[in-house]
Amino acid sequence: MNPTTPTQPGRLSFGEPAMAGGILALGVFALVRAGSIAEPVTAAGAIGPRTMPYFVGGLLVVTGGITLARVLRGERGEAEGGEDVDLSGGTDWLTAVLLAVAVLGHALLIGVIGWPLAGAALFTAGAVILGARPWWRALVVGLIMAFAIQLVFAGGLGVSLPPGPLLEGVAFLHG
């Protein structure tokens, strides 16, 4: 297929340019905010804390810009065929709202009970909302995953996620 040929001719929809523009705007935001990160004085050539945000922001700007240009030029993405999706079904708003509440609860719980327990609660809530049964199995898997992530960050990367008041004295959870 010729990359300049529209995949689906017709009127420009709102969704595709809005998504591409949103990615571009997010990249610009990341680049601007990365400049405000305080960098300690390091040796010449050392990678500082701004490097990754600049890299990700740059990739977002390039990706969003190219995508926006292609969409405005008339190229369209192919519509989903819905191979195993019921296209006649609507959005399950209750599930969507419950998942959003679980993510908000996770954000609020991190400071109160610490990252490992809040992460386990998020996983458990998400799994149960999406239909996992029995709930205690989702809790066990969530605890294992959250503590494994805590160990990777603390032990492997030297970055401490907040352990919370219940786990404050546990040495292997600190970076």
Image: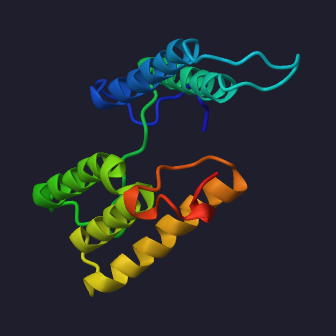
Question: Is any part of residue 12 visible from this angle?
Answer: yes
Name the foreground residue: 23 vs 72.
23
Name the foreground residue: 66 vs 59.
59
Residue drawn at the location 15% of the way across and 52% of the way down:
97
Would you place residue 12 above or below residue 115 in this image?
above
Q: Residue placed farthest to the front in the image?
A: 169
Residue drawn at the location 43% of the way across and 38% of the way down:
77
Q: Residue placed farthest to the right in the image?
A: 44
Name the foreground residue: 48 vs 164.
164
Q: How is the image coloured?
A: rainbow
Res. 117 image quadrant? bottom left
Would you place residue 130 above or below residue 49 in this image?
below
Q: Quadrant of the N terminus?
A: top right
Res. 43 image quadrant? top right
Residue drawn at the location 48% of the way across and 65% of the way down:
146
Residue drawn at the location 81% of the way across and 19% of the way down:
42
Name the foreground residue: 166 vs 118.
166
- Residue 20 as seen in the image, left or right of residue 112: right
Would you place residue 15 above or below residue 152 in this image?
above
Would you place residue 54 above or below residue 92 in this image?
above
The number of numbered badges drawn on the structure is 0
Query: Residue 72: image x %, image y %?
Result: 42, 18
Query: Residue 140: image x %, image y %?
Result: 40, 80
Question: Is any part of residue 133 visible from this angle?
Answer: no
- Residue 71 as seen in the image, left or right of residue 134: right
Query: Residue 165: image x %, image y %?
Result: 39, 57
